[in-house]
Image: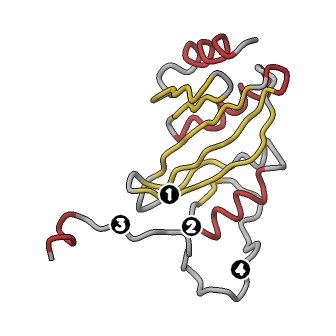
Amino acid sequence: MGTEFTIEQLKKDFKSEILEVTEKNRRRMIVTIKPEAILKIAGCLYKDMGFRFVIASAVHTKRGFEIHYHFSKDAIGLILNLHVILDKENPQVESLSNMFNASNWIEREMHELFGINFLNHPNQEKLISEGNWAEGVYPYRKEFKTISKEKE
């Protein structure tokens, strides 16, 4: 199953859930999906297409909280990122930790640093910051200037 087949199969199976496909190069693809589709599409990559979950990473941008879930299909050397953009005010998405044990700690870290709520996560207790900053403070959140603030 090559790169082209993988992407075409995802487009066919999840047409309404895929927002954008970006080919960074022959071996790296980014598939932006609706956040509510994360469990279905991650499950398909793993169970049906032979990908493995590697890690996830998050960033806070003007668009919202963005998470890249990194998957690898080692046999063909393909890295596929499932990319979701979460709400700016109430960032939440289903947890992958019940599907992949490896996502447990990174989701806890993203919760702690960004305040992203991972729905159905088995344990969102603090992982690294106990006593380092106040409850409800998320050090990786950014303050973005709005047009009205810039004019003041």
Q: Residue at x 79, y 20 (%)?
A: 76
Residue identifier under label 3? 144
Task: Tell me which amino acid carries mark 3.
Answer: Phe
Element type at marker 1?
A: loop
Q: Are marks 2 and 1 in contact (CB under 8 Å)?
A: yes
Residue identifier under label 4? 129
Q: CA distance from mark 4 to mark 3?
A: 24 Å
The quadrant of the rendering that contains the C terminus is bottom left
First of labels 1, 3 by sequence position: 1
Q: Position of residue 14 (x, y in %)?
A: 56, 21
Element type at marker 2?
A: loop
Q: CA distance from mark 3 to mark 2?
A: 16 Å
Is 22 located above or below residue 76 in the figure?
below
Mark 2 crowdedness (10 Å alpha carbons): few <14, some 14-19, many ≥20: many
Q: Are marks 3 and 2 in contact (CB under 8 Å)?
A: no
Q: Describe residue 86's horizontal placement relative to residue 48 as left or right.
A: left
Task: Tell me which amino acid carries mark 2.
Answer: Gly
Q: Nearer the viewer, residue 124 or 58?
A: 58
Q: Are marks 4 and 3 in contact (CB under 8 Å)?
A: no
Residue identifier under label 2? 115
